Structures are given as C-alpha cells and as structure tokens.
Image (tube, rainbow, N blue to C red):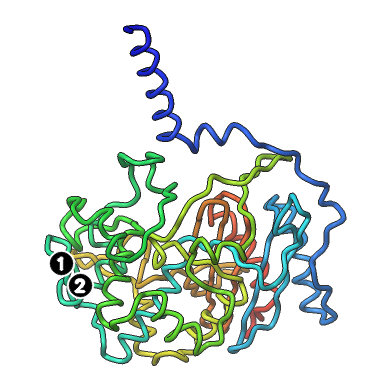
Amino acid sequence: MKKAIISITIITLLLLSYFFFEPIFTYTSGWNNSPDKSELNPIHAHKNITQQKADSILKIIYKRLNAPAVSIAVGQNNKVIWSNAMGYQDIKNKTLVDLNTKFRIGSTSKAVTSLGIGVLLHENKLRLDQQVKQLVPYIKNHLGELTLKQLASHTSGIRNYGVCFCFPVWEYYNNDSFSSVEQSVELFSDDPLLFDPGEQFSYSSYNYTLVSAMLEGATGKAFPKFMKGSVFDPLKAKYIEEETSETIKNAVKFYEVQDQHYKEVYPVNNSNKWAGGGYLASPTALVKLGNAFINHRLFDLKTRELLTTPVLLNNSEINEQNYAIGWRNDTKDIFENGTQINIWHHGGIANGSISLLMLFPEYNLSISMLANKNGTSADLFENVYAIAKIFINPKS
C-alpha cells in the first residue's frame, strides 16, 4: 500500500510539473526541417520603379529575418501606395501568404487602441485625467484612483505578466478563454502597485486591459464592438479583429524558428489583453489606421497632439521611453546625414509573431511590417527604415 501511495504521488507530481511547465516540455519536441525557400519571390511583381525597389528590399528582408512569412504595407498621403508579402502562411501545407493574411500584432495593439481613445477624447466622452472609478463600477480598490493618462502611458504602477498558480505557470502563455474585460481585469486587480502612480515608468500590457474597461464604461459597448464600429468600419480597415478561437483560424500559423528548423509555437489565448496585445491584423489594415492617425480623419489635430506628446512623470521629466498615449515619440537620423526625422511607432511581440507600425508624420508616411516567427520588434526597425528610404525624398 505504501509503495502504491508513493507511486501515485510521484506520478501526480510529474503530471503537475508537466502542465505547469508545458511550454518548456513542448519546446524540445516537434521540430521540422525548414523547406527550401530559394525559389520563393514576393507575391506581386510591381511595374513602377519605386515599387520595384521595395519589392527587391522585401526579398533582402525576408532572407535576413529568416521568417516563414513577411508582409509589409506602406501608406502615404492617406493612400496605401505599396504592399507586398513573401513566404508561407502555413509551412506544412505550403500555403503562401497573401496581402489579406492576418498576423498577431502583439503590443502594436496599444497604438490601435489609441485611435479609440482619440475618438472618445474628441467627442468629449472621455478625458485623460478621468479616473477608473468614474467609469468602471466593478473596480472598488486602489485601481479606481488611477487615471486614463497613467494607464495609457505605463506610469500607473500596474505590474506586467508574471507567474501564477495556473496551467501553464506563466501568464504570457495563458491559454484560457476570457469572456469579458471584467474577467480579464481580475488577473491583476488585487495586486499592489509597483510604485506610486506617476512616479516612474513600467511597461505593462495590463494597463491597456484596464484602459479597455474605461472605454467600455464611456461608451456602454463591449470593447471589440466599439473599436469595430468607431474605428475600423469608418476607415474601411478590413482584416483586423480581436483574437478569438474563431478569428485565429483565418490567420497565419505561428512559428518558432532556429536556423534551418521550425515548429509551431505553444498555443496561447490572448483574449485577456485585446487592447494591449491581442489583435490580429494585416499590414494594409494597420497602414490604413496609420494614415488616418497622421491625417486626423477620426479626430482633430489637437487630439492627435494629446496622443503623441510624451507623458511627464511627477518630477516633470519625460518618461524613459518617450511614451505618449499608445505611441513612442522619437527622432532618428535614418539617412545618416545629420537630419533627425520624427517617428511615432509601436512594436509588438506575440507568441509566434513580431510587428512594427511606424509613422513618419513629416512625410505623411506610415509603414507596417509583420512576420510569423518569435523574436523581437527590434529586429524590424532597420528593415522598416530601409523601406522608408525608398518612399521619402530626403530633400523635401
């Protein structure tokens, strides 16, 4: 009997260990040899000389990133002026990516959400100094004192992803489905703040989960319904939607890539962070949003300035990432000629995907780049600059 109890205990512990740390166990198996991609080309061969240059750069980027698929779109003067893609949406079935194929965009979702914030600011249905408790009745604790500005600029003190007594143990790899924003907020609502609001900067996607709760309170609509009706539909931005078990079926497959091997990533569910990291989109859809943002089609110039002005800490210093409301506001000498160009941008990582949306307001230019592999959005910056140089006249 004693041996039986010991055996059952050991088996139980092994099973618990597996489910707690399942992403680690599954990572070591299921790897496949990458297919020969030497014969692949961009799916469109443009005739315009400038667009042909972009096609050629895409081939270089594709090889450099070593991703199953790369998709890029460029908008200028409120139009989509070039888009192209290359590679596999689904490696196993040899399905090629197309221009409407959606990718996980990770934290680029925050820039998307900023357009929804802008709509409500413009309509005087929301204020940046408004407190959570004024719009979210189910928040009864310290989170109720936070303001929209603190949340949207990551100066609230709310923690980021951590470990939990759940399967798997890491919140980033959550695979539970959340039915509401209220349920999602419960993940962190009872946790203490990292610092007094406004004192420091600490990046956390959970800030935007609570932002979406405020948007729901201001509109009386579920967050996805509000974004679709007030942002996506007016801009005719198709192929962008929150990730669910249904919408994910129409997206790329998501991969881990190591040298000449690949495997599908551990399956996750991003329904607990739609506003901050749970959208699926095509680059063209994101560029349409970028075009609208630059040209203030959904709200006025004054509102756009509110969204792109880096937020000051309580000591009157700009936060360490030049973070505004859903955008980082930086300058870069992309031509290395001493001329600093203003850029508004937000990158994103999500399991099996990397994203970057970058706007060049001085040139009325927006660029979105997406790839279906694990990595970091930092991998995309120089590649976006390479595309931007084609469409920017440095003398203009």
> Which residue, as the protein is rendered here, is positioned at the far top?
2
- The N terminus, quarter of image: top left
Asked whether the residues under the numbered discs 1 and 2 touch, taking CB atoms below 8 Å apart as contact, a structural biologist would say: yes
- Point 36% across, 78% down: residue: 307
Q: Which residue type carries mark 2?
A: Val
Q: Position of residue 124 (x, y in %)?
A: 26, 90
Above-or-below relation of 38 to 251: above
Q: Which residue type carries mark 1?
A: Gly
The answer to whether 142 appears left or right of 204 in the picture is left
Residue 157 visible in the shown view: yes
Dot 2 surroundings within 10 Å: few (below 14), some, or many (20 or more)? Answer: many
Q: Nearer the viewer, mark 1 or mark 2?
A: 2
Between marks 1 and 2, how big is the CA–CA gap?
Answer: 8 Å
Residue at which label 1 appears: 144
The answer to whether 153 appears left or right of 327 in the picture is left
- Point 35% across, 76% down: residue: 222
- The C terminus, quarter of image: bottom right
The answer to whether 133 appears left or right of 278 in the picture is left
Residue 336 visible in the shown view: no
Secondary structure beneath label 1: helix
Q: Quadrant of residue 189?
A: bottom left
Residue at which label 2 appears: 136
Which is more toward the observer, 132 or 114? 132
Dot 1 surroundings within 10 Å: few (below 14), some, or many (20 or more)? Answer: some
The answer to whether 72 appears left or right of 19 in the picture is right
- Point 44% across, 85% down: residue: 229
Which is more toward the observer, 307 or 16? 16
